[in-house]
Amino acid sequence: MSDVTITVAGLRIVKLLVGNPPQTVAELTRSAGVTRTAVTEQLGELQAAGFVERETQRTSGRGRPRHLYRATNAALSLLFAGNQRLLVPAIWQAIHDLGGDDLIKKVINRVSRSLAEHYNSKITAKRPRDRLRQLIDLLTAEGKLVDVVEDKGGKLTIHKRSCPFISMVDPNLHICQVDQEMLVAVVGRPIRQISSRHEGAPCCTFEIAVR
């Protein structure tokens, strides 16, 4: 979801929905000042991207049910991405001021462990290679963009093209350790990060030998 973009027209619809009761297409059409077709198309795209949810409300008698649309929490995150870039570094700084590097390491370790527990509960494979494949399937199902390339020696390179932590990056890149520690805990093999998008690379890349 972090790499999903939104059009100017879609953003207008999102702003009409955020903080307001669920609305119908007719209500959004009146508020937006555009055609019903344009609103319907934008709602379809916003639903597919996870920014809008639709519920069906039954009417009394034989009337047709009506559809109501509301903004999701993802839409809220989208609107306040700039604020997150200010807030998250402030949180990291507060953690450091209160407990120094030791507390930061404990926070990173606990977050990584929580994520690993989440994925481990859904992974049934025993071999590291198969566990990695199942993990990639889970990440992909969540909307993350992850590619795995294997060389002739059995070394796997993991390219994480999208970053769920993009709004949480601090100047010292502490949050980047979460991915690596989570991968180690789930796959059960040493994993080395060889590049980071936060340091200019196209994506975060990890290497793992599973043989």
Image: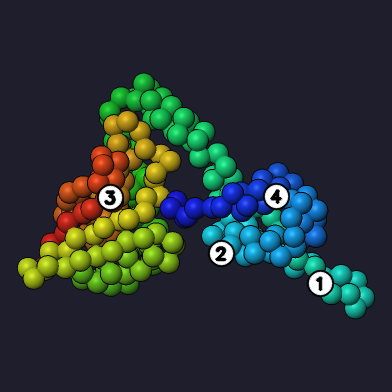
Mark 2: amino acid? Ala
The colour scheme is rainbow
Which quadrant holds residue 166? top left
Q: CA distance from mark 3 to mark 1?
A: 47 Å
- Image quarter of the C terminus: bottom left
Mark 4: amino acid? Leu
Mark 1: amino acid? Pro
Q: CA distance from mark 2 to mark 3?
A: 26 Å
Q: Secondary structure at mark 4?
A: helix
What mark, if any, has residue 114 been given in the picture?
A: none
Residue 61, horizontal then vertical, whole percent: 92, 75
What mark, if any, has residue 48 been given in the picture?
A: 2
Q: CA distance from mark 2 to mark 4?
A: 16 Å
Which quadrant holds residue 198? top left
Comparing 91 with 170, the one in front is 170
Question: Which residue corresponds to mark 4?
Answer: 17
Question: Which residue corresponds to mark 1?
Answer: 65
Q: Are marks 4 and 3 in contact (CB under 8 Å)?
A: no
Residue 179, horizontal then vertical, whole percent: 30, 50
Residue 76, horizontal then vertical, whole percent: 59, 45
Q: CA distance from mark 2 to mark 1?
A: 22 Å
The image shows residue 36, relative to residue 162, as above or below, that is below
The image shows residue 1, relative to residue 148, as above or below, that is above
Residue at the image position 39 percent from the left and 45 percent from the top: 165
